[in-house]
Amino acid sequence: MRFRPDDEWIGELMVSASAGGFSGVSQAWFSKDDLKQFAQAIMAFPLSADAPPAISGGLGGNEKSPPQDLVTLTFEPHNVLGAVRATVHLETEVWDGKERGLHSETTIGLLVTYGDLGRFGPAMLDVIDGRIEEAVLTSTP
């Protein structure tokens, strides 16, 4: 995950994900405050099963194309052993409604631990604030 600020309030989040031979890359615009709240939420223990931390960003719609969610991240409890299911959904942009069937998308799910999230959340905050270039979430075997 990388972040390119546009100004002091918003920026473009670039996300790449891969697991089990599948991969995807996309980017979307987010408010810095929303991203920081999300980063704080994924560090909670335990995560809420009823309202798991999730964030989604993309493009607003127009007369030719409906709104698009290009990047969606969700973290939810997976089992009683403390595993967390991370779901990353990525799509390419569609600028013309005629191209709607030509876009690419992928949904990648992987299991992570609360320890993994405990490292990723602070790294995500550092990326948003420009202290580091990239935050990486890896699954602990």
Image (cartoon, grey):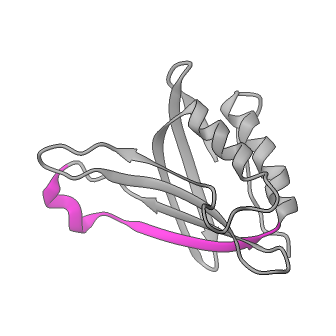
Residue 128 magenta-highlighted: no
Q: Residue 47 vs residue 61: left or right? A: right
Q: Is residue 103 magenta?
A: yes
- 81 to 48, vertically: above or below: below
39 displayed left or right of 10: right
- Could you say which quadrant of the image residue 61 lies in? top left
Residue 107 drawn above or below residue 121: below
User: Residue at the location (64% across, 80% down)?
Assistant: 20
Q: How many marks?
A: 0
Looking at the rendered image, the quarter that the C terminus falls into is bottom right
Q: Nearer the viewer, residue 2 or 121?
A: 121
Which residue in the rendered view is the most extreme toward the top?
8
- In the picture, measured across the screen, residue 122 lies left or right of residue 94, that is right
* Residue plotted at (64% across, 48% down): 1
The image quadrant that residue 109 belongs to is bottom right
Residue 51 at x, y percent in the picture: 60, 61
Q: Quadrant of residue 33?
A: top right
Q: Position of residue 135 (x, y in %)?
A: 73, 46
**Residue 97 position within the rendered picture, expressed as x and y whole percent measured from the top left:** 15, 56
Q: Which residues are drawn in magenta?
A: 96-113
Give the camera-side residue of 49 and 105.
Answer: 49
Which residue corresponds to the image point at 70% horizontal and 27% vertical from the top-left? Answer: 130
Q: Position of residue 40 (x, y in %)?
A: 73, 43
For residue 54, side relative to residue 66 (left or right): right
Quick check: 12 above or below 39?
Answer: above
Question: Which residue lies at the image location 13% right of the left edge and 59% below the top edge?
Answer: 98
Name of the residue lying farthest toward the front: 50
